[in-house]
Image (cartoon, rainbow, N blue to C red):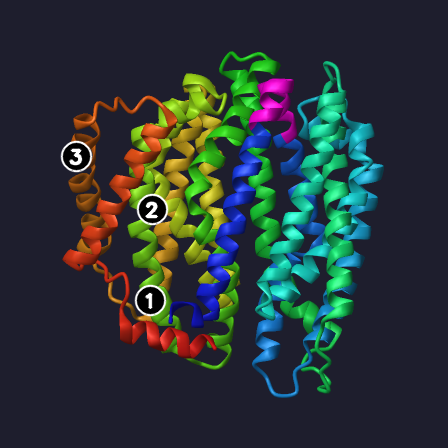
Amino acid sequence: MIFKSKIIRDTVMLTVMQICLDTAALMLNVFITKQLGTSAIGILTLTGSFLGLAGIISNGNAFLCMSRLISEELGKSGGNPNRILIHGIKLCMMLSLTVSSVVFFLAEPISSRFFSGADMAASVRFMPIALVSGAVSSCFKGYFNAGRRSSVTAAGDVLEFVVKSAVIIFFTIASDSPSESIVCEIMIAGIIAGNISSLIFFLIAFAGNHEHYRGKGTLNFRRYAAYAFPIMGGGILTASLSSANDALIPMCLRQSGNSVAEAFSNFGIFEAIVIPTLFFPSVILCSMSGIIVSETARAAASGNKERIKSLFCRLSRWTMMFSVFAASVLVRFGLPIGELLGGGETAGKMISVIAPVVPFIYMEIILEAMIKGMGLQAFSSLNYLAEYAVRITIVLIFVPRIGFYGIAASYYASNVLGNCSRFIKLLRNTGMRFEPFRMIVVPVLYAYMTMCPAQILMSAVGAELKSIPEMVIYTLIWGAGYFAVFSILGGIKLFDGKEFGKTVKNAQ
């Protein structure tokens, strides 16, 4: 019964795939940290941040554009999704070639300013290859996602990661005390190889298995661009602010008394150990986000407000239930996790300190997916602007004064502000009634109620919760009790037959 819903089938498949990828990515970060040091991982993170910004500008946030506009095209009579794909590739090529030219000719000033004076101009000039291939690849990812062919998108992502990781690992092992420039080149070489391999895969998948549509399509290139630019604007704004924030952190850490190497080291610990650990439990939500954009866009295009309200109601409650438990586990085991992953006591303390804001971070994944699916791009952009304005302001004020923990303060303030705004906006748009006791108090209460019995049970068998197997077993027992309490006491019904039946029917 459950797997008759394509949404659930796709979510399960994507979640399993994402768990494997996130685990592998975390292990890759640990490997690089041990091989090259935490300073190198900071440089790699900053390189990835710059490439992410350039990539969003050069591909026009193609994945989101394709997912939403093709989903809407599929819901219209006479629609032709293949023409939308052609429009998207055409626009991406125009943007990526323009951005690539700018990056190539301004490599030296980009190197000196964005990378805190490190000599990386030669490495930056290789980035255009990654930008062009990544832009076209993003179009195909969005096309397959909108067509509810998530398995193709997932296979492309796996191939891209495997190739990228293999290249990075090979050159990391082959390098003997590499310079900052060499570290940057290793990162870019891996991204180029990954992007090209996934692009070839998507081209083969499209050529061998795509539908032919007789309709002329509802959008020409000009109208496509008119719809796409507002969507692009939000992605570009977010990426720009995120990159600015990343570039400022090492600079502000140096003002707090860190050397250049220490600043990159602390930044690397935060971005490569702390953040991936905090986000790791959210894989199921990340897997659902692309599907939610498509489903919400279809419901919005057909005027199905009840469908949108139902999605928002159930997703927000499930997300809060799940995220409160994840935050509790991270608070409980933050210190050993940080030390286990090579970040030491600093990473462990930071994980425990930031963990209480995890429910806000996880809610953003679901809320932003629905906001984008509903076409509320103006609100999304303004909200991100306010969120990053707060984050950057706190980084500039507090990091020079209190160092590493100023970053935690910026995450608290920006995530609470930004996601409360998103939640209020969707409450107003959907008409859902907010129930703070059921959504917030109940999960926190149940997490505490089930933690103590699990602790007593482990103590009764002599477990001290210091080894990995003991922590895993404790978490499984705690989690089983937590979700069982929800099912028995009815704080949130894990399976509502009538509501689930409607979801299945609408998803077909």
Sequence-first tag of 1 and 2: 2
Q: Nearer the viewer, mark 1 or mark 3?
A: 3
Residue at the spot of label 3: 452
Determine crowd level at label 1: few under 14, some 14-19, many 20+ residues with C-alpha closer than 10 A.
Answer: few
The residue positioned 76% from the left and 21% from the top of the image is 174
Q: Quadrant of the N terminus?
A: bottom left
- Name above or below for residue 367 compared with residue 121: below
The residue positioned 69% from the left and 80% from the top of the image is 80
Q: Give the magenta part as a residue range.
A: 30-44
User: Is residue 35 highlighted in magenta?
Assistant: yes
Q: Position of residue 493 (x, y in %)?
A: 24, 62
Q: Please name the amino acid that badge 2 sits on.
A: Ser
Judge left or right: residue 450 versus residue 20: left
Q: Position of residue 154 (x, y in %)?
A: 60, 55
Residue at the spot of label 2: 323
Element type at marker 2? helix
Q: Please name the amino acid that badge 3 sits on.
A: Cys
Q: Nearer the viewer, mark 1 or mark 2?
A: 2
Element type at marker 1? helix
Judge left or right: residue 334 versus residue 404: left
Determine crowd level at label 3: few under 14, some 14-19, many 20+ residues with C-alpha closer than 10 A.
Answer: few
Sequence-first tag of 3 and 2: 2
